[in-house]
Amino acid sequence: MAKLLEIKDLRTYFHVDEGTVKAVDGVSISIDRQQTVGIVGESGCGKTITAQSILQIMPHPGRIEGGQILYYPDPDGEPVDLAALSPRGRKLRAMRGNEIAFIFQEPMSALSPIHTIGNQIMEALMIHNDGMSQSEARQKALAMLESVGMPNPEQRIDEYTFQLSGGMRQRAMIAMSLACSPKLLIADEPTTAIDVTLQAQILELLKRLKDEQGMSVLIITHDLAVVAEMADEVVVMYLGKVVERGSVKDVYKNPSHPYTRALLDSIPRVGQERRKFLTAIKGTVPDPYSIPKGCEFQPRCEHAMEGLCEVRKPEYAEISPGHIARCFLYTHNESEVG
Amino acid sequence: MLGYIARRLLQLIPLLIMISFLSFLIIDLPPGDYLSTHIVQLQQSGGDIAEEQIARLKARYGLDRPFHQRYFLWIWRIVSQGDFGRSFQWNAPVAEVMGERLALTMVISICTMIFVWVVAVPIGVFSATRQYSVFDYVFTFFGFLGLAVPNFLLALVLMYISYAHFGVSITGLFSQEYVDAAWSLGRVINMMQRIWVPVVVVGTAGTAGIIRVMRGCLLDELRKQYVVTARAKGLTESRLLFKYPVRIAINPLISTVGWLLPGIVSGEAIVSIVLNLPTTGPILLRALQVQDMYLAASFVLLLSVLTVIGTLISDILLAYVDPRIRYERG
């Protein structure tokens, strides 16, 4: 399938008084048209900053220091390098919300508390459609609310976020993001802040809208079940780096990086032997100012090889076609260890 | 919204009754009254005063009656005839003494508020969006300077500079020929030429304060998630700024608009004395010093009523701009 977005060796750094935080350090991800890609990882692994870097909306003082973000507006046309555009410029603004849209984690704080949801959806429409009238925008907004399954849209359109339930807020957020029919939807933890019973509904809704609108989805989550449910491809991130990448089937059947295995082992399974304890990943994520010299995961890794993993950075190894892992287990030969 | 306003207005009634009683009580608490001070002064200067004359004066001002009767008589006259009683010291109705001064004080206060907002809000917004820039540091410095320098000192310095370097005396609101003249276009122009001095002097501290409040609130709001959402939609930075974070960050300022009203009456007494302004501040001070009780009580009453009304206006404005408050209780 034709490519829609290709992130190549992206580096987004935060220069602060304490030092430099390499939140995203050489990440490469590619998303095909109508494909769903999931990024998983613990808090602070850089998955959100990776996504925000695409539209350059990461918090101050984050800056893209290197790499390319190639966006293909037409399947056969020339790509645009979004990383090279000015974050305040007109070209990037024309992309935001129009070609690439965002859904945020907490709809309560991500929507303005003092504007009606209708106002905010109509604004999204009117920014990118010159000359669209108020009444046209309102009609479109109502249609959007209808399509995301908002109950009683005629009444809800004039309500504020604090008058809506959690599920309705997230539906309003989705309606706003999809108002301009974007080609790529980035969903940052879209179900984390929602009731478990509603999570499945929201995921179903996202799947349906994806098929209806023929868009691609980049879903960011710490929940492996969400990725299994939604995604075609999965990218596992740890400390600003991609540690494993491949199709959902390959990665879940044959998790190759010790971190991915540990993540999968930490989920309870139905039918699992009762007496067996869940395995937690030992240790904690190192603080961002003292990244290990060798492999980032080495201090927590069960398979760490002395004299190798703490000294050198591992390379990517191909496990099977399209399935790669960044680990010495697959690249070193015994003679190197010493 | 209408229900909210009606409910707030109803709540005012018992509050105002309490306030009027308390203000009268406070004025009545100190021992002695204006008349006894007056008699002592007369006797000291060798004058003799007949018993019956004292009794007549007491009866005229109602000082021979018990406290509660005096209170109800005072309130009744205010409510029924708008008569606030007589000022002993000025030997004139209280309303007459306060009249023009109150109007002039209002003009100065409102001009000051407009000045403060027009200067402070844009600077606050600019400081917040360019946090830690040279601009931000410069205005933070001047802001603290403005907060720390007492207003009357600033008034004195301005007067000195104006007199020593330009030979212009900037005290008072009117120049010599207009002080006692009737209102005319010339008098208004004359006032406008001089009003900027008290406005700047009184406004400096307010400006500094509001810059800090605006900057702080906006910095908080700028970090909120909805700002990122608006940016992700493709809004330009300036439209985004004024539609979302500024609208929310300005709420604390709106809630202080009401404080302006009581400030009008007590307003900057020291500055008024230094600059010799015909405002209400100096009279209030003097009335309290000589126990001119009806004048003082009327001032205290007016101050309290204006505080209450001012707070109400703030609350209504706030409910108007912020739906979270409007819908809070039905």
Image (cartoon, coloured by chain):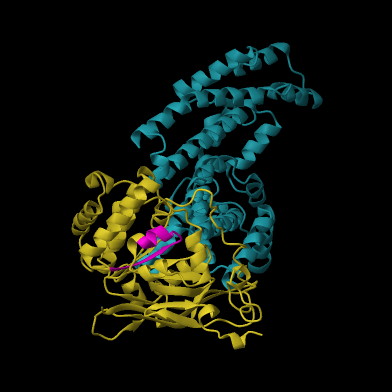
Chain colours: A yellow, B cyan
Residue B267 or residue A177, whichever sits in front: A177
User: Visible in this render: residue B137?
Assistant: yes
Q: Position of residue A200 (x, y in %)?
A: 33, 52
Picture residue at 67% right of the left edge, 61% below the top: B145
The picture places residue B183, in percent across and down from the top left corner, at: 46, 46
In terms of depth relative to the viewer, which is nearer, B328 or A328? A328
Q: Is residue A217 magenta?
A: yes
Query: Where, quadrant-wise, is the C terminus of chain B in this rendering?
Result: top left
Q: Residue furthest bottom?
A: A335
Q: Which residues are magenta?
A: A216-228
Left of B36 or right of it: where is A294? left
Residue at the image position 55 percent from the left and 80 percent from the top: A328
Instruction: Determine the image quadrant of residue B71.
Output: top right
Residue A25, compared with residue A204, is above or below; it is: below
**Relative to B158, B320 lies left or right:** left
Task: Using the image, determine if residue B171 lies above or below residue A249.
Answer: above
Q: Quadrant of the N terminus of chain B?
A: top left
Q: What percent of the width, then of the height, locates residue B137?
A: 62, 69
Q: Quadrant of residue B81?
A: top left
Residue at image location 41% in from the left, 34% down from the top: B329
Image coordinates of residue B159 in percent, x first then y, are: 66, 59
Q: Is residue B120 left or right of residue A152?
A: right
| Res. A189 visible in picture | no
